[in-house]
Amino acid sequence: MTYNLYSGTVFQQTQLTPMQAVLLMRGICKGESSKVLAEELELNYGTVLTLRHEIQLNAERAQPTAPLPDTHTETDEMFQNAGEKRPGTF
C-alpha cells in the first residue's frame, strides 16, 4: 500500500491536486454550490458532490454533543483587533 498526503482522508484515491483540494474545502466552507465549484476547479460535478457529502458528514460527526459549560458566550472579543493597523504599517 502506498501512503501519501491524502491517505486516510476523503481525498484518498482521488486525482485532485493539492490546490484543487484546498479550493474545494474553501468553497464548501464559503457555501458555494457544487456546480460552481466543479466548473471553477474543472472537476466532474458528481465527484464534487460526493466529496462535499463526505466532508459534511465528517464535520457533522466531529461536532461535540455536550453543551457548552458557560451560561453565556461572547464572540465579539475574538474580533476586537480586526481591521486595526499595526504601528509602522500603512
Image (spheres, helix red, strand yellow):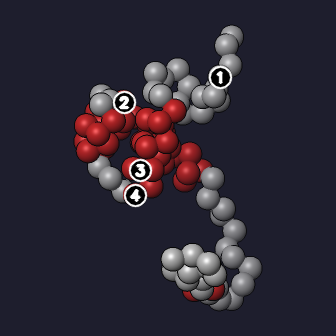
CA separation in Å, label 1 and label 2:
20 Å
Mark 2 or mark 3, which is nearer the start of the sequence? 3
Tag 4–tag 3 contact (CB < 8 Å): yes
Disc 3: which residue? 28
Query: Along the horizontal axis of the image, is 43 left or right of 17?
Result: left
Q: Which labelled disc corresponds to residue 47?
A: 2
Circle 2 packing at 10 Å, graded few (<14), some (14-19), many (20+), is few
Residue at position x 74%, y 79% in the image: 69
Query: Pointer 1: what residue?
Result: 4
In the displayed structure image, the side of residue 89 where residue 39 appears, left or right:
left
The answer to whether residue 60 is visible is: yes
| Marks 3 and 1 close (CB-CB < 8 Å) | no
Would you say the residues marked 4 and 2 are in contact, meaning their CB atoms lie under 8 Å apart?
Answer: no
Query: Residue 38 falls in which quadrant of the image?
Result: top left
Residue that protrudes farthest toward the right in the picture: 69
Q: Nearer the viewer, mark 3 or mark 1?
A: 1
Q: CA distance from mark 1 to mark 4?
A: 27 Å
Residue at mark 4 = 30
Badge 4: how crowded within 10 Å, few (<14), some, or many (20+)?
few
